[in-house]
Image: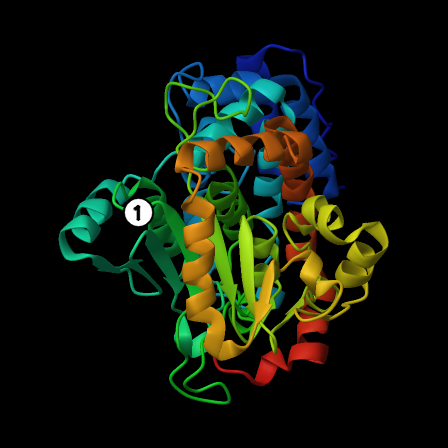
Amino acid sequence: METVIATPVASGDFAADSAAFATYWRGIPPEQAAREARYAFLRRHARTLYDKLTDGRRKFVRLERLVYDAAASVPGLAPTKAEVDAESALKQSEKRGIEIDQGILCNQFLADPECGRHLCHAMLLPREESAEALAKFRRDGKLDLGTAKVERHGKAAVLLLSNRRFLNAEDNATQVATEIGADVCILDPDSQVAVLRGDVVPSGKYAGRRVYNAGINLTHLYHGKIPFLWFLIRDLGFVNKLFRGLARPDVTPDEVSGDSIEKLWISAIETFAIGGGCQILLATDFNVAARDAYMTLPARKEGIIPAMSNLRLARFVGDRIARQAIMYERRIDCDSEVGRMICDEVVASDEIDATISTVIDRLTGSGAVGAIGNRRALRLAAEPFDLFRQYAALYAREQAQCHFSPALISNLELFWNAQNRKA
């Protein structure tokens, strides 16, 4: 006769509950009952656990380390790094979905106002590698990070997305490089604004053209090369830094009492901004687009949530068009009435460089201090820090479920022919 293991009831005693739940999780497979028990444990102890891992919120721990520290502190609560590494060699369809438990953990950390704000703060600090990268950039006037590059053009630090084999798509190989590049652009004292654009693609259909961003690397997604944490690290780190600037360790990054390190960001959209590329346009301050460029959010065909687009897109184009773009894959041409709600200047392709220079001069003409003050005020009215935290909590939970859904695999096979593409 099969032994039925009783689900523990959280008593409120962290040590006792940790031991009881760890024993329970060892005895059952990672199924729904185990996940419900994780929620039950975290609803009582998320703040206690977070404070234990961060020395009472006196130190900042980035998300990619925090989840594994939690797994070591409370066995069975979330997968260990060794367990996730073992699954990383598998195609997405072959994975057991153990990373869903990381989504539950992040959801509960972010849902707690104090812990969630502290975690968002941690992800807005400059990366450790960025100080050395900044010194190199200031010395050489350029920085090659592999899949991202930083160049200086007059008053601007320019971040180039350079995953050229994949049309400047984002994947696990680009994540650290793009975030370091953003840190360097923001911290660079010799530039007044930052520009984000795609590098020139060397071969294929778009050879010789700049491509802004092809979104998430769907081939890598299908082949299991995009871990769940990639989504949260990207949008709490790189993209949120474009939107909110860099935090200081001793001051909260919220708009009212904070004192972030910021620059205005200009995006230059050439060819297309698909998926993640379109998401980024909702975080930058001024968007210059080529007349033949377009934007899409093909989340329906991918089976995932388009990051912060559900939070931000309706502010630009209204609720109905936002729903059409997200749920019905409405294409938005940059040179259209709707496209101009997102793109501030739409010009011929050969006028992009000159237009960027003009925009830089106009944005810096009244001084960086006034521009940043206005940026913060606009952000407070539209998306205050705590609203972002709450959305991130929801996103952590829902994206984890989507990432391991059978629908994701079938969508990629049906719409992307992913099974026949080389990773």
For residue 384, side relative to residue 121 (left or right): right
Q: Is residue 220 above or below residue 304?
A: below
State the residue position of label 1: 191
Q: Is residue 244 visible?
A: yes
Residue ID at (45%, 62%): 356
For residue 78, side relative to residue 31 (left or right): left
The amino acid pointed to by label 1 is Ser
Q: Is residue 143 above or below residue 118?
A: below
Q: Secondary structure at mark 1?
A: loop
Q: Quadrant of the N terminus?
A: top right
- Image-quadrant location for residue 414: bottom right
Q: Is residue 291 above or below residue 371?
A: below
Indicate the position of residue 141 as horizontal and vertical percent values. 20, 57
Indicate the position of residue 156 as horizontal and vertical percent values. 34, 53
Q: Nearer the viewer, residue 30 or 222?
A: 222
Outermost residue, left side = 139
